[in-house]
Every structure is written in structure tokens, then in C-alpha cells.
């Protein structure tokens, strides 16, 4: 069908399918409810669409089809003069008529661009017993009902042109692994999700509140601290933010001033999270090595749908630097190496969108920040993780977030129980602009 021209597309479909038709429908191209009315009336033939005016090739197609009856919905009765040679019947547009009803299962499902001839294809699909999905620009953004229809189909047929680069998104829908709490996109245009996290290391309370209890008790604690963060209607996603690699005072055997936590120490937290609809973020403090080098050590976890990654530039040292004498820094180029690798995992495993966090409380911590890539496989969050008085934190927030509205990433906030004075309340956090989508507690 001609791309972006539903009027011509409807005629093309009619010519391809019908040699003749005893009944033909006519509806405005811009009025989906009129098309739904004709579908509900049991139109037994093609639906032709009318644009701003009745084009000559529509009359040519009508004559070719030679119908006994023309059913009309949504058009002025004056069109009867144009159709004087036919038996014309006008239907009042039914505001409750449904054009596309998703059956629980369909062996064959058609995917259609919303700019195509949706009405005519929907009527034909219903007649043939075929499922139909009008696709969003991002297949992962489809409603759950449509995603289930796609996932259960034996055959998918693309009825419009779709960018080949988005084919992997169909694989994500077909696999059906969702983010805890539902959906394939971390943050959507028509819904909001907020991750509330406890931060720390599994075996010590010295590095944050996560280590003050075990995984099961951690789930319970998350439920307590999340109270109030749903006040703006956001869907709350409880989260374990686990320090996977810990900045160290000594160089260690590998000389990188960072200690990797054994995977078996982290594994119980990953498994408990999966069983309780909790998300996991693995936090990296790499010292003198690269973020990507450490990320690959935890690759088996990052291939799971409920595990994301955080990069902490404060602990990314240059050669000859040591922790607590210098504040670390990382360039966008190194971050983008992780971005590309992690996005590749998402495609390879057909995973839902994966969270990638980069911590920042000074401009110097991320050089060339504007060059950070934000591919659709990942949901990018910059987390302002400074500590101190609430006024000072607000100032840092305003400086760091200024001018980032179009950068493609969202923002996170960090609460420190001991170092902040006072610790911000949910109401104070939700008053920030932009509104944080990630809030962690240390």
C-alpha cells in the first residue's frame, strides 16, 4: 500500500483483493469511528476512504467493483449526488463501535502503520479471522493486549513499511520478558515509573543501607521507604542498587584500586529480586580500570531482564591518582563503550529496555556529557548523588540539570541518611524539576 496515503492505500487494497463486490463502504480517511461503524454493521466488501474531496480514481474503483449497495458513514449526504448511479445507504456514526478487537489468539497477525489504510485493512482482517495490530513507532510501546496477540501468533505479516533496524523490537515483544511491574519500556510517554532503591554492599553496612539486612528483609524495607513516592501517580519499582565493585585504598593484586565482588555473593540478591518483582542495579567503582572491563565480569547478570547497570565516575581514577585524594572522572567516549555493549546484549537476548545510570555531582566527573549516546535499547539516567544540606543539593541539582531537557536522559536523586541535613522528604523530591525517576537511599 502507498506509504502515508490511506486513500490510495484503500484503493490499492481493494484492487488486490476484490474482483467485484456487491457491497462497498465509504468513510472519511480521517474518521476512524466512521470506519468502525461500517465494520460493526458487517460490511461485506471493501472500504474506500475519502480525503478532502472525492477523487476521480475512487469513482473508477467503484465502477470496477460494480456494487449493488454503497454504505456510507461520516460523510455529508450531499455525496449522494456523486453516487447517483448506486443504491446509497447512510449509517449514523456509532461512537461506541470498535474498529479493532484483539482476539486472545490468532494464528496470523498483521502489523500496520497508523498512517496506512487502517479501516479497510481492519475490515478485511476481521473477515479473514486475522489478528491486526496498529503499530506504535516503537513496537515495545504497544498495549499489553496487542503485545500478547503478537507473541501468540504463528505468523506475523508486515502490511506497511517498517524500519528494518527496529526488527529486534518485535523479537522483544515475541519473547515477552517484561520489566518488573510490567511493560517493555522503562519510562513511557503515557505512563511514569519511578525506581526507589536501597544502595550498598551485600556484606557490610558501612557502605550503605542495603547491607544492613538480607535480601528478603531488603524487599520489606523497600516497601517502607517507597511510601509517598507514588503521590504523583508514578508506578513504583523497588530496586536493589548493589555496589558490585568497590573502590579500595590499596592497588590490589591487579593494581586497579578496585575490588570485584564475587558473583556468588550477589546472586542471592538477583534471585530474590526476580521472585519479588524487584529491579537490580549493579554499581561499578572501577578505580584505574575501564567501566566496560568490570561490566563484562557481571555479564551473566546483565543478560537478565531485571538487571541494569550504574557507572560511578567519582571512583574512576586516572593513572597515578588514588581514591579520596582526587575525585574521579570519565569521558563520554568510555561511557559510550558501555552503552554500545549493553545495547548489544539487549538485542541479542531480546530483553526489555535496560536501565543505565551514570552518577554525577560535579561537572568535571563527566567530560563531554552532551555526547553520551542514548539508544532505544537503554533508558539513560544521570543521578545527582551529592550529599550535604538540602539547599546545597538543590543548587547542585539545578546547575547539573539545566539545559538537559532534550538530551535523551532522565534524572535521579540520592538521599543520604547520615550525611544529608535534613534528608529530603518524598514531597521535596517530587517538587524538583525535572522530576526524578530514580531515588536511592544510602
Image (cartoon, rainbow, N blue to C red):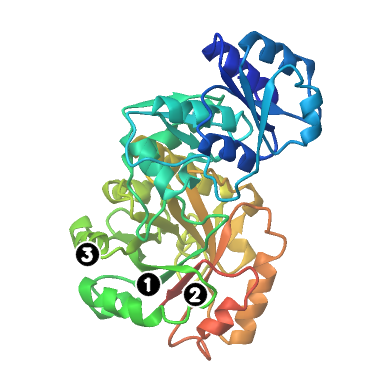
State the mark number for residue 414. Answer: 2
Q: Which residue lies furthest to the front in this view?
A: 87
228 or 264: nearer the eye?
A: 228
Q: Report the residue at 69% width, 25% height from top.
A: 7
Is there any visible trace of residue 338 in the rendered image? yes
Choose top left, top right, bottom left or bottom right for residue 182.
bottom left
Q: How far apart are marks 2 and 3 (CA)?
A: 24 Å
Q: Report the residue at 25% width, 70% height from top.
A: 202
For label 2, the crowd category at 10 Å Cα-Cα, with few meaning under 14, some 14 to 19 and many 20 or more, is many
* Callout 2: SS: strand
Mark 2 or mark 1, which is nearer the start of the sequence?
1
The quadrant of the image that shows the C terminus is: bottom left
* Callout 3: SS: helix
* Callout 1: SS: strand
262 or 401: nearer the eye?
A: 401
Is there any visible trace of residue 5 in the rendered image? no
According to the picture, the residue beneath numbered tag 1 turns out to be 199
Mark 1 in CB contact with mark 2 (< 8 angstroms): yes
Is residue 363 depicted above or below 65 in this figure?
Answer: below
State the mark number for residue 272. Answer: 3
Amino acid at each position: 500500500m502507498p506509504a502515508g496515503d490511506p486513500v490510495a492505500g484503500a484503493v490499492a487494497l481493494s484492487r488486490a483483493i476484490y474482483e467485484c463486490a456487491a457491497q462497498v463502504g465509504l468513510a472519511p480517511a480521517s474518521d476512524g469511528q466512521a470506519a468502525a461503524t461500517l465494520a460493526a454493521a458487517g460490511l461485506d466488501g471493501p472500504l474506500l476512504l475519502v480525503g478532502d474531496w472525492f477523487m476521480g480514481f475512487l469513482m473508477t474503483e467503484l465502477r470496477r467493483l460494480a456494487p449493488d449497495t454503497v454504505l456510507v458513514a461520516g460523510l455529508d449526504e450531499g455525496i449522494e449526488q456523486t453516487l447517483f448511479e448506486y443504491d446509497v445507504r447512510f449509517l449514523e456514526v456509532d461512537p461506541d463501535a470498535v474498529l479493532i478487537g484483539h482476539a486472545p489468539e490468532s494464528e496470523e497477525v498483521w502489523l500496520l502503520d497508523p498512517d496506512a489504510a487502517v479501516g479497510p485493512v481492519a475490515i478485511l482482517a476481521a473477515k479473514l479471522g486475522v489478528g491486526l495490530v496498529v503499530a506504535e513507532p516503537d513496537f515495545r510501546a504497544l498495549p499489553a493486549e496487542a503485545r500478547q496477540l503478537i507473541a501468540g501468533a504463528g505468523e506475523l505479516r508486515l502490511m506497511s513499511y517498517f524500519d528494518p533496524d527496529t526488527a529486534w523490537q518485535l523479537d522483544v515483544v515475541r519473547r515477552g520478558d517484561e520489566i518488573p511491574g510490567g511493560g517493555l519500556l522503562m519510562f513511557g510517554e503515557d505512563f511514569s515509573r519511578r525506581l526507589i532503591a536501597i544502595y550498598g554492599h551485600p556484606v557490610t553496612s558501612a557502605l550503605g543501607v542495603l547491607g544492613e539486612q538480607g535480601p528478603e528483609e531488603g524487599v520489606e524495607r523497600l516497601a517502607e521507604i517507597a511510601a509517598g513516592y507514588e503521590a504523583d501517580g508514578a508506578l513504583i519499582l523497588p530496586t536493589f542498587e548493589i555496589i558490585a565493585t568497590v573502590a579500595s585504598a590499596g592497588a590490589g593484586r591487579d593494581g586497579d584500586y578496585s575490588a570485584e565482588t564475587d558473583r556468588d555473593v550477589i546472586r542471592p540478591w538477583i534471585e530474590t529480586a526476580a521472585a519479588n518483582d524487584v529491579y537490580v542495579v549493579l554499581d561499578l567503582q572501577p578505580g584505574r580500570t575501564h567501566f566496560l572491563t568490570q561490566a563484562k565480569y557481571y555479564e551473566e547478570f546483565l543478560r537478565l531482564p531485571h538487571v541494569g547497570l550504574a557507572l560511578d565516575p567519582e571512583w574512576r581514577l586516572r593513572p597515578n591518582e588514588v581514591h579520596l585524594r582526587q575525585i574521579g572522572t570519565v569521558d563520554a567516549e568510555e561511557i559510550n563503550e558501555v552503552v554500545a555493549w549493553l545495547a548489544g546484549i539487549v538485542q541479542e537476548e531480546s530483553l526489555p529496555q535496560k536501565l543505565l545510570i551514570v552518577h554525577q555531582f560535579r561537572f568535571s566527573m563527566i567530560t563531554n556529557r552532551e555526547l553520551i549516546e542514548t539508544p532505544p535499547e537503554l533508558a539513560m539516567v544521570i543521578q545527582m548523588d551529592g550529599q550535604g544540606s538540602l539547599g546545597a543539593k538543590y543548587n547542585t541539582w539545578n546547575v547539573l540539570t539545566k539545559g538537559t531537557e532534550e538530551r535523551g536522559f532522565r534524572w535521579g536523586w540520592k538521599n543520604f541518611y547520615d550525611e544529608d541535613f535534613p534528608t529530603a522528604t518524598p514531597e521535596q523530591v517530587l517538587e524538583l524539576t525535572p522530576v526524578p525517576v530514580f531515588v536511592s537511599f544510602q
